[in-house]
Amino acid sequence: MIETLKNYLFYLKYQKNYSIKTIDSYQRDIEKFLKYIDDEDYTLEMVDQTLIRNFLSCEIMNGISKRSNARRIIALRGFYEYLVKNKIVTSNPFLLISMPKIDKKLPDFFYIEEIKNIFQENSQREDFLAPRDQAILELLFSSGLRVSELCDLTLQKINIKERIMIIVGKGNKERRVPFSLNTQKTLLYYIENTRKEILVNSKSNGSNYVFLNSKGNKLTSRGVEYILESIAKKINTNMSLHPHKFRHTFATHLLNQGLDLRVIQELLGHSSLSSTQVYTHVSNQKMLEEYEKAFPRRKK
């Protein structure tokens, strides 16, 4: 079973193009389930609905949230789909397991004034890596990239002059994503100056990835998260600068500007429109907040 799991994780990484973070989560979920069926003296083929429901019930009793259990079902359903495809088992019992109902959490986002302040404060930095960090901030906001997509971006996939990128997203699906004029200037300065200095100083072999760490190697998702945490400290803000918050802000901003929902879906690389529709709720919430400012409740 261990070898089968290794092969599946390899498949997720190199054929499905899943992010390291997602693969790590799926690995933990599947390993937990494999330990459970081993303790119960079951094989992969013997797994049925009853065993699965018992496993999920045990997880809930151990304090696991509905959201985490839902992710486990998705991870294990995909794993069994792979097993069926490779003739390791004959059927996928997880297809018969319904997903727990979860209250949808509205995406957290920045207001445009907050974004402007973050960019302005960070642009005052004078340290060597400041131009790289500014380029990361501006690209995340103006393109809505997933952090894994930003890390995987190569020089061959970005056209600075035309302000367009070819992004390979989930499921190895390619999409064209534009970026702003401000981002164009920031990126050009970083690539032509800071990035070249990083390669010279680190004596690197010349990585083709756009964003590099101080040693000249490709930035990881965790590396970007650390950079954003450091920026928050340097500009003295209590706001969370998580990469996905910039993606939420990108989508919400475009929706507020009247862009068609299907265009936003294409830019974000969502396979389903329902994933994009959550931003309509955010936009409506913002609209109500602005309305309340215009028509405040009378004091009794």
Image: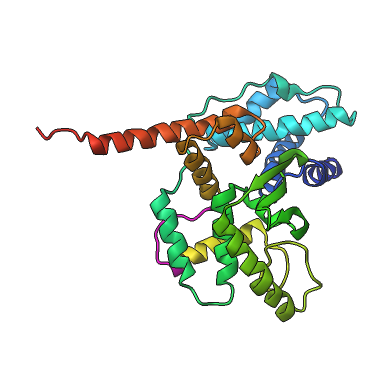
Q: Nearer the viewer, residue 176 or 8?
A: 176
Colour convention of the picture: rainbow
Residue 274 x, y percent position in the rendering: 58, 27
Q: Does the magenta-highlighted stretch encompass residue 246? A: no
Q: Which residues are magenta?
A: 234-242
Is residue 71 at all visible to an observer of this figure? yes
Residue 237 x, y percent position in the rendering: 40, 62
x 71%, y 36%: residue = 33
Kindly give the residue lying farthest to the left in the view shown.
300
Is residue 42 at all visible to an observer of this figure? no
Q: Does the magenta-highlighted stretch encompass residue 238? A: yes
Query: Is 227 left or right of 208, judged from the image as shown?
Result: left
Q: Is residue 93 above or below residue 152?
A: above
x 20%, y 35%: residue = 296
Number of marks drawn: 0
Q: Nearer the viewer, residue 276 or 51?
A: 276
Kindly give the residue lying farthest to the front in the view shown.
161
Instruction: State whether the magenta stretch is mostly helix, strand or loop.
Output: loop
Query: Is 150 left or right of 108, judged from the image as shown?
Result: right
Q: Nearer the viewer, residue 16 or 195?
A: 195
Quadrant location of residue 188? Answer: bottom right
Quadrant location of residue 56? Answer: top right
Kindly give the residue lying farthest to the right in the view shown.
87
Residue 284 x, y percent position in the rendering: 40, 31
Query: Is 49 left or right of 7, judged from the image as shown?
Result: left
Residue 292 x, y percent position in the rendering: 26, 35
Quarter of the N terminus within the rendering: top right
x 45%, y 72%: residue = 124
